[in-house]
Image (cartoon, rainbow, N blue to C red):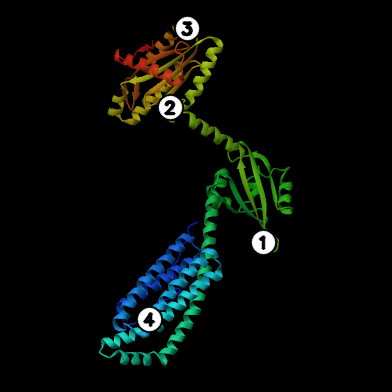
Amino acid sequence: MELRITPADIFPWNENFQTGISVIDEQHRKLVELLNKLASHLAYGVDKPELNSIFDELTDYAQYHFKTEEGVWKKYLPTDELSVEHALTHQTFVTEVLHLRGKQDALATEEVIEEIVIFLTHWLAFHILEADKHLSKIVLAVQKGLTLPEAKAKASTEMSGALRVLIETILSMYDTLSTRTLQLMREVAERQRAEERLRLTRKVIDSTLEAIFITDAKGIVVDTNPSFCLDVQLEHEQAVGQDIRQLKPGLFSQNKSDEIWRAATESGHWAGETVGRDASGEIEGAWMAFSSVKDNQGVITHYVGVVSSITHLVKRQQTLEVEANHDALTGLPNRRLLQDRFAQAVTRSNRASRVLAVCYIDLDGFKQINDSLGHDAGDDVLRIMAGRLSKVLRGEDTVVRLGGDEFVLLLGDLESEESAAQLLSRLLKDAALPMLIHGKQVEVSASMGVTFYPRDHGTLEQMLAHADEAMLAAKREGKSRCNFYK
């Protein structure tokens, strides 16, 4: 589930944080930005790897910033105790951040998250306003020509009095602000998660094959999914407001209606098979789960029905089987179904001691039609040829389109190999008849290679390879003819 994280400043930058030293102020802004990023991700409960990555980024940048600061202080206060104490404070901060990260890994409770955020905001605000601002005033005074003792005395005076009150006020404000902002961010995060769950639920309902409807306590439809609308052949707006018993009488047949409503009302649920008629009037079998929905006081406010059409599922399964086993262009069996038909033909041939012919057909002149008239014309040729081949064959025979302009015939129940000659001759003659394609008369013919079972006692792939070899020989010999594999 993807959460929309809205940036929120738990630590908004304030001009009072300016120290007057540009490189330090710029890095302070970056630290505040990282702190806000971490606080936002903590509040929104993102994955630990991402949190750890932000912790690492904050820690690494803090160490980089501290090194920059200490370089500035050492330049102007090389051995001063204020500079040494400041460096120790930096190390304490890094240690505490790593400790807090470990607590977050071990126990990501709201209390721990709040502790982390409050510590970071309080420390950073105090450090900038108190320590960094103090040292910055000393540095700026030294840069203006004061001696170090004079600069320290001047900075101490400026950091007392009204500025001290300002610092304490700002620190108190940031403690309160960080806590309240964190609470608000949690509320926003939870609301966004709830909205995301609702959107996901709606997507599931809208995309499911089951017909789903929701009624009020009186059985009046208040909502449906697309499958239900398709089932009743109405738009959503047309279905809403109708009595479900009149809209789908087959679900609430006269002998079951009272039972269904009583069970859903008294026990909260009913499930069973129903038989009625769909929108087109055809008899339809369905399985329905019907449940009641109650408010906090236990009063029924809605009913929900989930309907799985058994008839539609059977039809859908049949459609899928046809699509999987037949060529989309011609409707003929495809290579997948050929294997099954071949196995059946071999079984019949063995049982009745009859001959089976496997014929490989390739059209002559098909490429020229495709090139001159286009692929649509070529498709028409293939459909017409499929019809001609099917018309010539007997009930026990099979014609298959392998792909392109290649077809395979299984001719079963033959008395002998010679008995196939008459059927194949007629087939070649029909294949060569002129066709009217896109207003133009065109002609194609067929070259055929044939092998016979059980003399050619091989697998389907082996026999197809032999028949293909014979077909290529027929093309070399002048096309529009049949050649037998020897």
The residue identified by callout 4 is: 84
Where disc 4 sits, the SS reads: helix
Asked whether 242 or 37 is in front, the reply is 37
The residue identified by callout 1 is: 295
Classed neighbour count for the residue bearing mark 1: other residues with Cα under 10 Å, few (<14), some (14–19), many (≥20): few
Give the image location of residue 79, x and y in percent: 33, 83
Label 1 close to label 4 by CB (< 8 Å): no
**Residue displayed at 29% across by 88% down:** 141
Whether residue 462 is situated above or below residue 220 in the rendered picture:
above
The residue identified by callout 3 is: 416
Q: Amino acid at mark 3?
A: Ser
Q: Amino acid at mark 2?
A: Thr
Classed neighbour count for the residue bearing mark 4: other residues with Cα under 10 Å, few (<14), some (14–19), many (≥20): some
Label 2 close to label 3 by CB (< 8 Å): no
Q: Quadrant of the C terminus?
A: top left
Where disc 1 sits, the SS reads: loop
Sequence-wise, which precedes: disc 1 or disc 4? 4
Sequence-wise, which precedes: disc 2 or disc 3? 2
Label 2 close to label 4 by CB (< 8 Å): no
Residue 210 visible, this orientation? yes
User: Distance of mark 2 from mark 4, alpha carbons?
Assistant: 88 Å
